[in-house]
Image (spheres, rainbow, N blue to C red):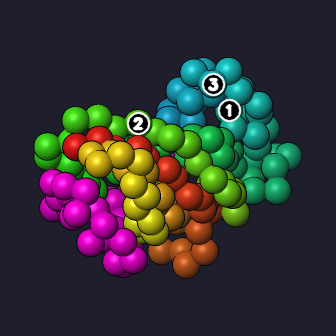
Amino acid sequence: MPKIFDSIAALKAFVGQPAVSGDAITVDQETINAFAAVSQDAQWIHTDPQRAALESPFKTTIAHGLLTLSLLTGWYHRCFTFPHRKMALNYGFDKVRFTGVVPCDSRLIGSFQLERVDDIKADEVRCVWHVEVHIEGSERPVMVANWIMQLRY
């Protein structure tokens, strides 16, 4: 069930609460290849399973770091709803780090913890989310970042 933020006050009340995690997403070769086509990054470590099996230290293809980062949007929209929100803008990221590789067929889980809500105007705020992506069952994240979303109610 998604967490509901129907006002700026609801967002502010959620600051510092435990992280909310999304459902696992499998990153298979088809997903990696589709991302390679869109991003025009077809480096063999991502797109050539046979070569990766022979030459890569991981013995398989790995997901692009930016593919891992891009999955956050889907988790965000499934974890949270914002009734009465008039606008949302992706303001950007701070401190993005790819702290581990994502082997093909990994199941990833994204989590979101609201660190800060900064007022911009009476009806507009910037929310700073600490986000992490883990391979299912792993303690160590493969990606960490601070994601800034600007919201207007």
Q: Mark 3 points at which residue?
A: 39
**Disc nearest the viewer among 1 and 3:** 3
Assign a secondary structure to mark 1: helix
Question: Going 65% across and 46% down the picture, which residue do you hit?
Answer: 65
Task: Please state the extent of the stretch shown in magenta in the rendering.
Answer: 1-28
Q: Nearer the viewer, residue 20 or 47?
A: 20
Report which residue position mark 2 lands on: 89
Quarter of the image that includes the N terminus:
bottom left
Image point (29%, 48%), residue name: 122
Label 2: how many Cα within 10 Å (few below 14, some 14–19, many 20+): few
Tags 1 and 2 touching, CB below 8 Å: no
Residue at point 14%, 43% (across, down): 84
- Residue 43 falls in image quadrant: top right
Q: Do the residues labelled 3 and 2 touch (CB within 8 Å)?
A: no
Work out whether mark 1 precedes mark 3 in sequence or the reverse, and give the earlier one.
3
The total of numbered circles placed on residues is 3
**What is the distance, in whole Å, between disc 3 and disc 2 at their CAs?**
22 Å
Q: How crowded is mark 3: few (under 14 residues within 10 Å), some or many (20 or more)?
A: few
Q: Name the residue under label 1.
A: 47
Left or right, residue 61 beside residue 137: right
Question: Which amino acid lies under the numbered mark 3 shown in the image of this protein?
Answer: Ser
Going by the picture, which residue comes out furthest to the front? 122
The image quarter containing residue 58 is bottom right
Secondary structure of the residue carrying numbered label 3 = helix
